Image (cartoon, helix red, strand yellow):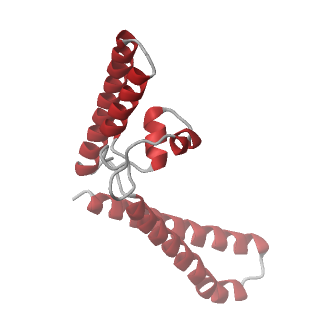
Amino acid sequence: MDFERLKQKELCQALGVAIRTVQRWDCPRNDDGTYSLPEVFKWRLKKQVASGSSMAEINRISAENLAEWRGEKAKLAALERRRIEGELLEVREICRIADAAGCAVRESFESLAIRLAPLLAAETDAFECQQILEQEVHIILNGLENHFAWEEKNDGE
């Protein structure tokens, strides 16, 4: 997250205020309409000084905000490190993997009827039909499990 270019919702979350509160404020904005968190902090401090808040109160609030900002910055750095190390995936990558999984499952089960029709057409015993169906479903599930285990193993290389 770029603390120099926050959207309104992100600024509200960083400051712990409602969107309507920020909308009522006449706080500084960047040329592109985003907010700079440090600039908004400075603006808020000036407003508090002008309103007669004590310096001790302002310093306490500033220290709390700085500590919170540093904590959030550290969390972002940790997430970025985990992303670089391959521990985290982008949402679009997860969607790609889920889409591939869905396609593989669909293709596997769509081919089931073609493979089973000749086998079941000759069978008259319900128990034998059930056994054939269970065996084919088991084969599909094992194939999918092997397919995705192979993908996972090769994605890590």
| Relative side of 36 to 120, left or right | left
Q: Quadrant of residue 78?
A: top left
Establish if 125 lies above or below 19. below
* Quarter location, residue 116: bottom right
| Residue 116 at least partly seen | yes
- Name which residue lies at 59% across and 81% down: 110
Instruction: Where is residue 126? Give x, y as percent.
Output: 78, 73
x, y percentage for residue 89? 35, 55
- Nearer the observer, 71 or 78: 71
Q: Position of residue 50 (x, y in %)?
A: 41, 23
On-image quarter of the C terminus: bottom left
Tell me if residue 72 comes above or below residue 121 in the rendering: above
Please name whichever residue, 36 or 140, is drawn nearer the observer in this view of the structure.
36
Counting from the top left corner in percent of width and height, residue 24 is at 55, 42
22 with respect to 44 (left or right): right
Is residue 122 something that shows in the picture? no
